[in-house]
Image (cartoon, rainbow, N blue to C red):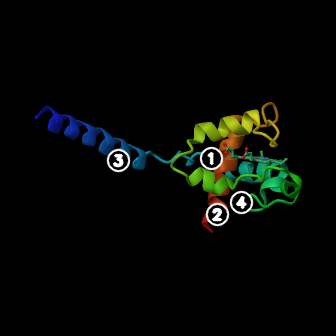
Amino acid sequence: MKKILLTCVLLFAVGSTVIAINLKPKADYSNSNLVNGKEKFVKNCVSCHGELGQGDGIDGLDLNQKPANINRKLNSLFTPQRRLINDVLNGEREMPAWKGILSEDDITDIFAYVLEINLE
Ligand code: HEC
């Protein structure tokens, strides 16, 4: 009897975790400034990440580590936006740190712009 109860509790815990992950709210980009996002993206990111941010920029070809597909990262359930912003601020392996050059708002605007152009 105890075993059945334990199994039920376990199933419930696993089930609700799965539901919670799937219901994870998308980051809110409704207040983002797409004009600013475009300007900052073209100036700072396109060379490595490519026109659509998919990781195919010219400067990325010479790197040991292929630049990330930013659109895919943003749409992944397993990469919270907070982590991506921190990685851009602090740099990640061959990507330089943008802290001091870009603000968190700039990066959020860039993310909103990349999501937008990949919808088209
Ligand atoms: C010098 C080339 C270069 C430039 C310029 C560059 N990146 Fe990157 N970026 C990379 C590389 C290489 C990686 C992959 C690092 C890795 O997978 O460890 C990366 C990874 C990322 C990631 C994924 C981080 C993660 O946690 O997986 C994001 C998001 C990102 N870049 C955004 C940007 C943005 C926004 C800009 C412009 C402000 C930018 N990058 C400019 C090379 C670059």
Could you give the CA–CA distance between mark 4 and mark 2, rounded to whole angstroms? Answer: 9 Å
Report the residue marked by disc 4: 54
Q: Quadrant of the N terminus?
A: top left
Compared across the picture, whether 60 is left or right of 110 comes to right
Report the residue marked by disc 3: 19
Could you give the CA–CA distance between mark 4 and mark 1, rounded to whole angstroms? Answer: 21 Å
Compared across the picture, whether 90 is left or right of 14 comes to right
- Badge 2 density bin: few <14, some 14–19, many ≥20, Cα 10 Å: few
Report the residue marked by disc 1: 32
- Badge 1 density bin: few <14, some 14–19, many ≥20, Cα 10 Å: some
User: Label 1 sits on what residue type?
Assistant: Ser
State the residue lying farthest toward the bottom: 120
Q: Quadrant of the C terminus?
A: bottom right
Compared across the picture, whether 68 is left or right of 120 comes to right
Q: Secondary structure at mark 2?
A: helix
Report the residue marked by disc 2: 118
Coordinates of residue 11 in the picture (x, y in percent): 26, 43
Coordinates of residue 13 in the picture (x, y in percent): 30, 38
Residue under the image location 75 percent in, 57 percent down: 55
Residue under the image location 72 percent in, 57 percent down: 53
State the residue lying farthest toward the left: 1
Could you give the CA–CA distance between mark 3 and mark 4, rounded to whole angstroms? Answer: 29 Å
Viewer-proximal residue, 49 or 118?
49
Earlier along the polypeptide chain: callout 3 or callout 1? 3
Coordinates of residue 33 in the picture (x, y in percent): 67, 48
Q: Secondary structure at mark 3?
A: helix
Earlier along the polypeptide chain: callout 4 or callout 1? 1
